[in-house]
Image (tube, rainbow, N blue to C red):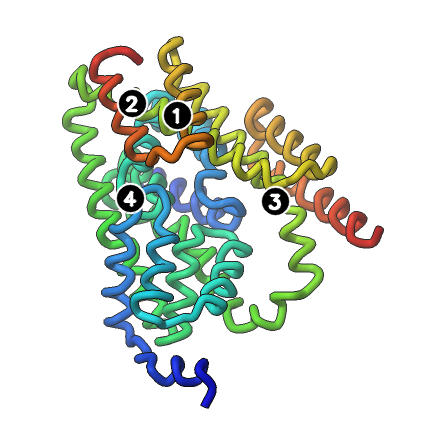
Amino acid sequence: MSPRDATLEARTLPDARALFLAFLKVGVSGFGGVMPFAHRMLVERERWLDEREFLDVLSLCQFLPGPNIVNLSIVIGRRFAGPRGSLAAFAGLILMPMVIILALGVLYRVAGQVPQVKGAFSGVACAAAGLVVAMAVRMGRALRGSAWQIAVAVVAFAAIALVRWPLVWVLLGTVPVALWLASREKTR
Amino acid sequence: MDAGVLVELARQFLLLSLLSIGGVNALIPEIHRQVVEVHGWMTDAQFTEIFAISQAAPGPNFLVVTLIGFFVAGLLGALVSTFAICGPASLLTYTVAHVWDRFREARWRILIQRALAPITVGLMFSAGYVLTRVADHSVGAYVMTAVSAAAMLWTRIHPLAMLAIAAVLGILGWI
């Protein structure tokens, strides 16, 4: 028996209940991104996946549309307990964060007009905008100076941020062109 | 509660679910366009404050959608919006999950990723631009945004710490 088989043997496969509880913990652990906590839970704590399996699942979740972490809960749930597993993992993931964010929403409605609270919110809003700008810069660096990719990014930015065209039309326009440009690059 | 608003929220977010190629933050410009400019459900200030709350709260960041739904149409609005933004993408993921292994190394898959990457970058810059434009109304505000972006890029400060500092400065009336 190879070491890999041994670790597979040692795993206890989760049922819907275990999935719900595990994702419940993941849901409340992260601020501004819970994926690192999902990784720790799946690979290190519960050992339901090994590192390679996690990366495979993650690449699928990033490839498909939708929130990555939600996609992850769907795939993991399905893998171990079918549709019930997906529902359980998804429900576990969003239950607590939803309750917390709705409580904050109520607080905002009740106290949002108090000058100090309003001041705090506008301060956080400015900083939050900065976080998104930083994220954009970080993602932009990954394009590594590919001329056509930078051109596509600039066009998408102009259409969405400056002209304010609807996202559907911008995607219908840019995705085919970007696909064509990407295919040319590969054949060269 | 006006059922028309719920239907409209559902329609918007069901569609956006399938268009969310770079995560929900990349959808921010489109969501802003819809809820502020097209429907007039909230003001610019309310939109940025709701976004700020969602960034400061624990959990996945797509919950900004939950909060927008709550603000527009109460608890029912929150539930409808949350399930709408997750539903179509989740069904798709559920359906494709078991055939994925076959396509992991496929050429067309790598091609699609190469093509979508720059569009996602464009959308993220749009989100940063739109949020900055609608949140910042003073020199202090622009400085705060710039400092926060710079700190994220060049220091190891935790995002929450940055938000907390900004909250204190806001209470003091400096922003």
The subunit carrying tag 1 is B
Q: Which residue is mark 4?
A: B78
The amino acid type, in three-letter code, at marker 3 is Ala
- Tell me whether marks 3 and 1 sit on the same chain: yes
Chain under callout 2:
B
Residue mark closest to the camera, 3 vs 4: 3
- The residue labelled by disc 1 is B148
Residue B170 placement, left or right of A114: right
**What chain letter is assigned to the residue under label 4?**
B
Q: Which mark is residue B166?
A: 2
Earlier along the polypeptide chain: callout 1 or callout 2?
Answer: 1
- Give the Cα distance between marks 2 and 4: 27 Å
Q: How many C-alpha atoms fall within 10 Å of the one at disc 2: few (<14), some, or many (≥20)? A: many
Amino acid carrying label 2: it is Ala
Q: Nearer the viewer, mark 3 or mark 1?
A: 1
Residue A60: horizontal and vertical position, in percent? 52, 61
The x, y position of residue B2, in whole percent, is: 29, 38
Specify whether A100 is left or right of B19. left
**Figure quadrant of the C terminus of chain B:** top left
Q: Looking at the image, which residue is at 60% across and 41% down? A: A142
Which residue was labeled with disc 3? B117
Quadrant in which the N terminus of chain B is drawn: top left
Whichever of labels 1 and 4 marks the residue nearer the N terminus, that label is 4
Q: Residue at x 43, y 50 (%)?
A: A67
Three-letter amino acid code at the position of disc 1 = Ser
Q: Residue B65: image x %, image y %?
A: 36, 41
Locate residue A95: give its quadrant.
Answer: bottom left
